[in-house]
Amino acid sequence: MKSEKKYKIFIVTGLSGAGRTSALKIFEDMGFEAIDNLPTYLLSKVINSKVKRNLAVGIDVRTRDFDPKKIAREISMKKKKLNISVIFFDCDNSNLLNRFKESRRLHPLKLDLPIEEIIEAERVWLGPLLSINDYYIDTSRLNLNLLKNQMQILFKTLSDLRTTVRIISFGYKYGLPREADLVFDMRFLTNPFYQDKLKHFDGKNTKVINFVKKQEYFYFFFDRLFILFKKILEGYKREGKGHITIAFGCTGGVHRSVVSSEYFHSLIIKNKKLEIFLEHRDIKK
């Protein structure tokens, strides 16, 4: 039987409207015990009890006596003894505004301010919890099915000691992937977009791949990145971080970042201690 120490406690928090409630339902479907809107005075009792299964506890601005600074300090102390992690759900302001309009729900803070200012006030207030997050999930571009898929990638095999590595290619013109732990700018490479014979292909095309890889600094960069990655991976493991998101960016997310992501994937794919996922965020744009 699984020992109690191996059961995981997740504190699920984040901005109102960013998907925290949906995430708790997904955790339930994955076999977790999920508790929503737990009063803060009960939080210690719950996480200190002998956990018999994986547990997800939702706390946010609706929680009675909610004090992010106090909660963040308490969780940081508990991490030294318990298998506890914080999942922070975030979303950009424009998508949050659309969600509140579509649902016709009031923001739970109920401040006498324009909704944009309420969202910013909540973002600042939640800063202490954001600063101690172990898993950051940006739902700006995620519907419910995509959120479910991402959570299953991150949390479906909690008994598996393998580290999850998510590799993303993206275009700077569409914004940074805010969930990324490491971001590498590949715009030091010559852009195939300005080559008439290549501009209409993407980074999976052999001609584009050859054009990018033949450039002077391509292998120089990845030889050193591979050494860096192996070292920081050891540090992440010591700190108990079970997943890493690495992003490679270029202007449009179609050529250089795609070639780079695919190549880095090929470098680490043989590591049996890693569970690796590859995503080309902007390749179709």
Image (cartoon, helix red, strand yellow):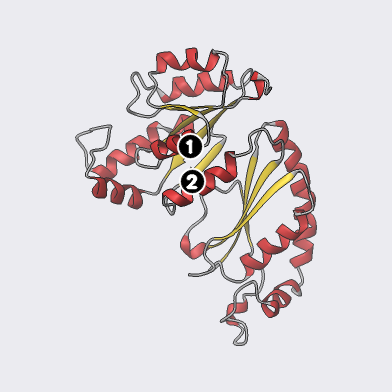
Q: Residue at x 57, y 49 (%)?
A: 180
> Which image quadrant: the N terminus?
top right
At mark 2, the secondary structure is helix
Residue type at mark 1 is Asp
The reply to whether residue 222 is in sight is yes
Q: Residue at x 45, y 19 (%)?
A: 70
Q: Quadrant of residue 69?
A: top left
Residue type at mark 2 is Lys
The reply to whether residue 187 is in sight is no
The label nearer to you, 1 versus 2, is 1
Mark 1 touching mark 2, by CB under 8 A? yes
Q: Residue at x 61, y 71 (%)?
A: 255
Residue 206 versus residue 22: which sits nearer the camera? 22
- Judged left or right of residue 217, residue 240 is left
Q: Quadrant of residue 41?
A: top left
Residue 273 versus residue 246: which sits nearer the camera? 273
- Judged left or right of residue 223, residue 78 is left
Q: Residue at x 33, y 47 (%)?
A: 96
Q: Return the x and y of residue 85 as percentages of the image width and height.
A: 56, 29
Mark 2 Cα-neighbour bin, 10 Å: few <14, some 14–19, many ≥20: some
At mark 1, the secondary structure is helix
Residue on which disc 1 sits? 29
Among numbered discs 1 and 2, the one appearing first in the sequence: 1
Q: Return the x and y of residue 92 as percentages of the image width and height.
A: 39, 49
Q: Return the x and y of residue 81 as percentages of the image width and height.
A: 63, 17
Q: Residue furthest bottom?
A: 196
Residue on which disc 2 sits? 148
Q: CA distance from mark 1 to mark 2?
A: 10 Å
Residue 259, disc: none
Residue 256 versus residue 160: which sits nearer the camera? 160
